[in-house]
Image (cartoon, coloured by chain):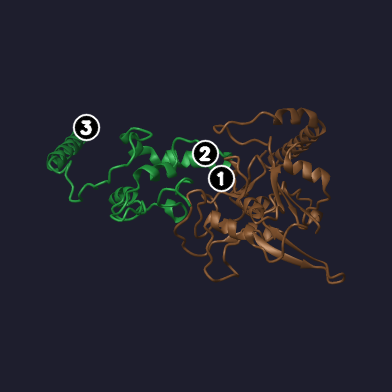
Chain colours: A green, B brown
Amino acid sequence: MARIGGNQLCRTGIVSLFLGCAVLWAPVVGHSDVATPKIPAAQGGQCVEPVEIMRRDHFDFLKHDRDKTVHEGIRTIKHSLAGCIDCHATKNASGQFVPINAEGEFCQTCHTYAAVKIDCFTCHATVPAVKMSQSP
Amino acid sequence: MSQSQPPSSATTRRRFFTQAGAGVALLALAPGVRLAELAVAASDDEPVTDAHRWGLWVDTSRCASGCDACVSACNDEHGLTGMGRPETDAQWIRKVDLKDETTGREVSLPLMCQHCEEPPCVDVCPTGASFRREDGIVLVDKHICIGCRYCMMACPFHARSFIHEDLSGQKTHSPRGKGVVESCTLCVHRVDENRAPACVDACADAGHHALVFGDLNDAQGPLASALAREETDELRSDLKLNTAVRYSGV
């Protein structure tokens, strides 16, 4: 009997602790000292996927499709890093493209907020490709 | 029980390779069947297949000593810029001048990745980063290259370069960066658009026409028909690599 009583006491204690914490944390949820990132607007129209899906899964899309391009030569894929840059790169006052991994730009803004280091741009171009018709 | 397991699995594996070898031999015995399949062109959405095998013919009688139009075009196409250190700077094509010491005959030729059918770089790669595409183009998947440089040591043609320093301003179609190995891609981004490599176009623009690009499997095409007509050699044919780049006059 004494053991059952002890268990009940323990259970009650844990529940109370959870309830207490929930009450204490309630005002904190939804508020952060870190300002949400101000993400520059894209140039194009609709993104290749809904925003919520892109935010959660863009790295899976990129990783999957990079193998298709590099190993299988498929260059018509839906999710390409070059495609991201084409829409999301912004121009500065003098009309030059700003590298997308520069502070304040599309990729970097969110990755700074999430404290995730992007490795893509060690190798990949950070501005849209110069179109054939634009080159001299 | 566990001690008797390895020999039996090794035997199974050996049998698999023997049978696989027999399958390859059968395929080789039926070239007519395979050639019929080659006529089917793959769409852009489908993986490349071994219906094509891309290659080059270098006619050294047309290659001018002192001309480096192919090298410059390659550097421009892929954004290869030197750091002023020739020992380690990336070089995908190098011009080589050969001289027969006895006869005095001189020959000039471009040397790049030979896109071997049996590439030593692929054999030694510990991660699978060095690979041969189905259509014969030998590439480095820089996503999985760890920069060990075994492939550079294995390549008999010294065709590969290692990038030692941070780069910027890369081309969209040619990602390159510090810590990985790279080499001639046969301008795979252009090949996938049915265009010839930059070096081939530059050689033609310079009026030399020493480089012919094409499909080794297409008997009627410019490359295979030229190779059927001309006397050509593989470099280091003793290694039996079956290179996709063939030379005349060496």
- Where, by quadrant of the figure, is residue A46 drawn? top left
> Which circle's residue, 3 or 2, is located before the other in the chain?
3
Image point (58%, 39%), residue name: A72
Q: In the rendered structure, are the residues bearing label 2 and label 1 in contact, judged by CB atoms less than 8 Å apart?
A: yes
Question: Given this view, does label 1 or label 3 mark the residue nearer the observer?
Answer: 1
Using the image, name the chain to which the residue with label 3 belongs. Answer: A
Using the image, name the chain to which the residue with label 1 belongs. Answer: B
Q: Is residue B215 above or below residue B30?
A: below
Identify the disc placed on residue B189: 1
Q: Residues within 10 Å of mark 1 (few under 14, many from 20)?
A: some
Expressed as whole percent of the image width and height from the top left, the position of residue B175 reads 50, 52
Q: Residues within 10 Å of mark 3 (few under 14, many from 20)?
A: few
Expressed as whole percent of the image width and height from the top left, the position of residue B90 reads 57, 62
Amino acid beneath label 3: Ile
Q: CA distance from mark 1 to mark 3?
A: 73 Å
Q: Residues within 10 Å of mark 2 (few under 14, many from 20)?
A: some
Q: Work out whether residue A74 or residue B230 is closer to the camera in this orientation and state it.
A: B230
Q: CA distance from mark 3 to mark 2?
A: 67 Å
Q: CA distance from mark 2 to mark 1?
A: 9 Å
Q: Work out whether residue B58 or residue A80 is closer to the camera in this orientation and state it.
A: B58
Question: Given this view, does label 3 or label 2 mark the residue nearer the observer?
Answer: 2
Identify the disc placed on residue A4: 3
Image point (76%, 42%), residue name: B224
- Residue under pointer 2: A75
Q: Work out whether residue A95 or residue B35 is closer to the camera in this orientation and state it.
A: A95
